[in-house]
Image (cartoon, grey):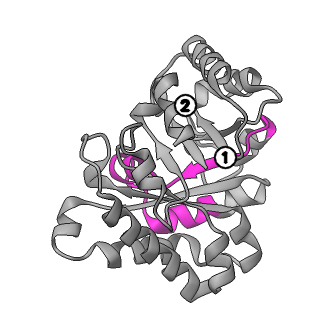
Amino acid sequence: MVVANWKMNNSPEQSRQLCSSILSKMSATDKEVILAPSHLCLSTVVESTGDSIIKVAAQNCHQELSGAFTGEVSASMLADLGLDYVILGHSERRLYNAEDNDLLAKKVISVLSQGLKVIYCCGETLEQRSSGAHLTRITKQLTEGLFHLPVKDLKNIVIGYEPIWAVGTGVTATSIQAQEMHAHIRSVVSNKYGDVIANQISILYGGSCTPSNAKELFVQKDVDGGLIGGASLNADDFIAIINA
């Protein structure tokens, strides 16, 4: 699975052009490819990808399905657009919008209630990693944000691991560091839901993944794909990552 998180980039027309470029360069693949544009461009991307293999995700949504929440977008609205996924808990949302695990737990329920799937992000800062608190940090984010779910809902959950110290910095976790954390995440899920469920969940790496390091990361046993930021804004780079 490869997810393109375009963040706050691209106008509707730029999104249309990027979709067209990606589709023209894609060959047949058994990978799940997902584009996550800004809310403004969701309709454009849904229309542009049409009946192709590409699926579409929103970058966030509100925890309530409707109400007096000016400027917000609900999961029910996103479902009506024909989306497949919603990204929740991205490190930038946690940092700049003060989203905590309790809030995200509510958002997860809201998204699942509308028949959408969740890409749930977790990650640690450089300070937390340096102090040795990184594994505890990830466990807490998973436990408080996801583990209220019944087993049946886990099939609709994807986990994205973000080493925050490597997001947008050009610094990438080594393949060994990535594998260590992904294995930890899978073991935490296994302790709660069992090995069968844990082995079915896709765990994506999201930290400055590029065409040059993608293959080394993806070959790791517990790295099931990537949550791609900057490199997904260039069609050639994104295709190279898919092919990796």
Task: Specify the segment rendered in magenta.
Answer: 80-108
Image quadrant where residue 209 sits = top left
Q: Is residue 86 magenta?
A: yes
Disc 2, SS: helix
| Mark 1 neighbour density, 10 Å: few (under 14) some (14–19) many (20 or more) | few
Q: Is residue 222 magenta?
A: no
Viewer-nearest residue: 77 or 58: 58
Viewer-nearest residue: 210 or 56: 210
Residue designated by label 2: 239
| Mark 2 neighbour density, 10 Å: few (under 14) some (14–19) many (20 or more) | many
Disc 1, SS: loop
First of labels 2, 1 by sequence position: 1
Could you tell whether 2 is left or right of 231 in the image? right
Disc 2 marks a residue whose amino acid type is: Ile
Residue 40 in the image: x percent, y percent? Answer: 59, 25
The residue under the point 70% across, 55% down is 117
The residue under the point 77% across, 43% down is 79
Residue 212 in the image: x percent, y percent? Answer: 36, 39
Please identify the residue farthest to the right as the structure is shown: 51
The residue under the point 73% across, 70% down is 153
Residue 217 in the image: x percent, y percent? Answer: 42, 54
Disc 1 marks a residue whose amino acid type is: Lys
Q: Which mark is residue 81?
A: none
Residue 136 in the image: x percent, y percent? Answer: 34, 79
Q: Which mark is residue 31?
A: 1
Q: Is residue 142 above or below residue 207?
A: below
The residue under the point 21% across, 76% down is 132
Q: Are marks 2 and 1 in contact (CB under 8 Å)?
A: no
Q: For marks 2 and 1, give the CA distance.
A: 11 Å
